[in-house]
Amino acid sequence: MRPFHPEFIFTALRQILPYLWVTIATMAGTVFFGSLAGILLARAKIRRGPVLRALSEIYIYVTRCIPSIVMLFIVYYGLPEFMLAFGIDINNFSKAFFVIVTFSILFAANMAEVFRAAYESIDPGQREAALSAGLSEWQAFYRIILPQCIVVALPNFTNALVNLMKEGSLSYTIGMLDVMGKGQLMIGINHGSYSLEVYLALSLIYWAMTLVIEHGFGTLEKHLSKGRKIVAAS
């Protein structure tokens, strides 16, 4: 068996890190589209009629029961065939497109529950008081409800973002060259040699990304919670 070479970890890091922007870009796209869809799903569960509420609940239940890798293959192999039925050829689209579509579908289901729980945690009397004070429905939501919802939702949003980062590593299975994809390519080029060193380098990268996410959103949560603590103390 080949001996362990710890110095190769730094070699792997130098070769993998330039692909970090691909991982970050796909995460950003997923968070943007998944959060928008999550808001619509949460709104359907909270404020809409029984039909939209039922459809939202079915969507959330079904998508949360499907493993990420299965959904990725369904989208990657199934979406081009589905679009061809309408005369649209997306076979030459970037693999990042299919990754963002896949994880947006899954992320939306999680965000719908996060946003719904955050909204329902706010006392309905605050909305009623804002409306009685002359604010419009939109002003009451934007100025009174939304800031509190953000604070409540941040911890669960942070956990969902960390899970998205880890599940996004599955994108290498369809050939996307992100952080994990580059690591797998290095292992293949070396015919399986230095696998341990490459995976340790990948572990360091994902560990560092997790620390940045948790510290960044933790700091934001503390900053936004100051007003709530002052009100509670008074």
Image (spheres, rainbow, N blue to C red):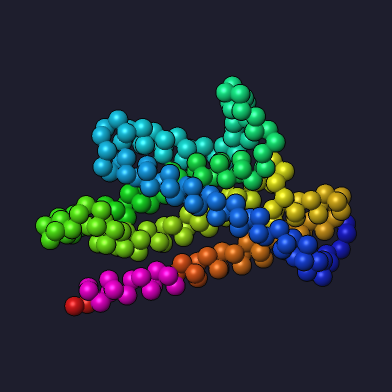
The answer to whether any part of residue 106 appears in the image is yes
The answer to whether any part of residue 112 appears in the image is no
Residue 198 image point, x, y percent: 76, 59
Q: Residue at x 25, y 53 (%)?
A: 138
For the residue pair 169 and 145, the one nearer the viewer reads as: 145
Residue 231 image point, x, y percent: 22, 74
Name above or below for residue 59 compared with residue 194. above
Image mark count: 0
Q: Residue at x 86, y 63 (%)?
A: 3
What's the magenta bit mostly, secondary-structure-wise?
helix
Residue 222: within the magenta? yes
Horizontal side of residue 51 vs 86, given as left or right:
left
For the residue pair 140 and 184, the one nearer the viewer reads as: 140
Horizontal side of residue 200 vs 125, given as left or right:
right
Residue 95 image point, x, y percent: 67, 42
Quadrant of residue 132 within the rendered picture: bottom left
Q: Residue at x 14, y 58 (%)?
A: 134
Residue 108 image point, x, y percent: 45, 45
In what quadrant of the picture does the C terminus appear? bottom left
For the residue pair 20 and 197, the one nearer the viewer reads as: 20
Q: Which residues are magenta?
A: 219-232
* Residue farthest left in this picture: 132
In what quadrant of the picture does the N terminus appear? bottom right
Quadrant of residue 206 within the rendered picture: bottom right
Residue 45: within the magenta? no
Horizontal side of residue 94 vs 222, given as left or right:
right
Q: Residue at x 35, y 61 (%)?
A: 150
